Image (cartoon, rainbow, N blue to C red):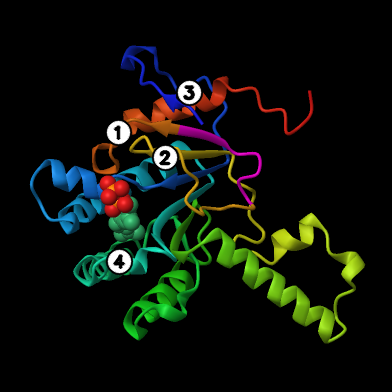
């Protein structure tokens, strides 16, 4: 995956291009952003949360149908406990705000990942937000929390094995479509575009199955500094790519 070089802003126009239906974002670079300023890593996450709010709203405004953001991976528990605690506080603040303030908003909130590890308070906020927003008709915002692509596949395989065991699933009926239906993102289209700020060339266990044909745009900007203009640049780059889905 090559690093995408930013272009002058005047070349941009997202009005004339076909937008992706589903965007994934790996919100990377919060720690480096804080370090550059001599601040604790948690300050980078606080700044990253503000960027997340702005970019999620912008995606909804321009008509993106699905946005999936990587907020906390199954591996992130290995970070120092003060950093993990700060992230959990940020999630709580955001979810309280989302319930209180976004009542008239059309965004549908979904959480993907293994929720069993979260506090009862966070868990009930996640459930409440999903319930409150279920009937809305706007952009679906998937927040990946305690998410790992491999863990997601293990869960799907275990669920299908149990269905085979109890006689409700014939192994011959296991298809790509059926696997997709056992993932957290069931019923949603696969991401067309995955944006990774901060210049790292890794998938980091994000939407492993779903990203089989996604276009990756790696950008040389840290997530807290990521702007609407950066998103526009990624959208233009996506529109220029020739997606062949394995054909010619
Ligand atoms: C990766 O950057 C970022 C994270 C592990 C956390 C992402 C979380 C947010 C943006 C906070 C808010 C989210 C919501 C949903 C309110 P890093 O810390 O690995 O950065 P580094 O690679 O520079 O160290």
Residue indicated by mark 4: 91
Magenta span: chief secondary structure: loop
**Of marks 2 and 1, which one's residue comes earlier in the chain?**
2
In the image, is residue 24 part of the stretch drawn in magenta?
no
Q: Nearer the viewer, mark 4 or mark 1?
A: 1
Q: Secondary structure at mark 2?
A: strand
Q: Position of residue 73 (x, y in %)?
A: 42, 61
Mark number for residue 130?
A: none
Mark number for residue 221?
A: 1
43 horizontally vs 144: left or right: left
Number of numbered discs: 4
> Ligand 1 shows up in which quadrant of the image?
bottom left
Counting other residues with Cα less than 10 Å from the Cα at mark 4, is it few (<14), some (14-19), or many (20 or more)? Answer: some
**Of marks 2 and 3, which one's residue comes earlier in the chain?**
2
From this view, report whether residue 79 is shown above or below residue 120.
above
Residue 53 visible to an observer of this rendering: no
149 horizontally vs 123: left or right: right
């Amino acid at each position: 995956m090559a690093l995408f070089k930013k272009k002058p802003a005047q070349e941009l126009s997202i009005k004339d291009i076909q937008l992706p239906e589903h965007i994934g974002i790996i919100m990377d670079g919060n720690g480096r952003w804080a370090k550059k300023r001599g601040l604790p890593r948690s300050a980078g996450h606080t700044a990253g949360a503000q960027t997340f709010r702005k970019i999620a709203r912008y995606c909804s405004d321009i008509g993106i149908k699905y946005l999936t953001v990587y907020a906390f991976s199954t591996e992130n528990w290995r970070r120092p406990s003060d950093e993990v605690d700060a992230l959990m506080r940020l999630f709580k603040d955001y979810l309280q705000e989302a319930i209180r303030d976004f009542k008239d908003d059309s965004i549908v909130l979904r959480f993907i990942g293994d929720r069993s590890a979260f506090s009862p308070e966070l868990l009930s906020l996640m459930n409440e937000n999903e319930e409150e927003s279920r009937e809305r008709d706007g952009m679906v915002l998937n927040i990946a929390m305690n998410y790992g692509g491999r863990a997601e596949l293990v869960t799907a395989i275990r669920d299908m094995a149990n269905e085979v065991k109890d006689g409700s699933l014939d192994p011959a009926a296991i298809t790509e479509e059926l696997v997709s239906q056992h993932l957290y993102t069931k019923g949603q289209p696969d991401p067309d575009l995955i944006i990774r700020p901060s210049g790292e060339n890794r998938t980091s266990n994000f939407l492993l199955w779903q990203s089989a044909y996604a276009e990756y745009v790696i950008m040389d900007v840290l997530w807290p500094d990521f702007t609407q203009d950066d998103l526009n640049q990624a959208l233009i780059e996506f529109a220029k790519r020739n997606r062949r889905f394995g054909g010619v």
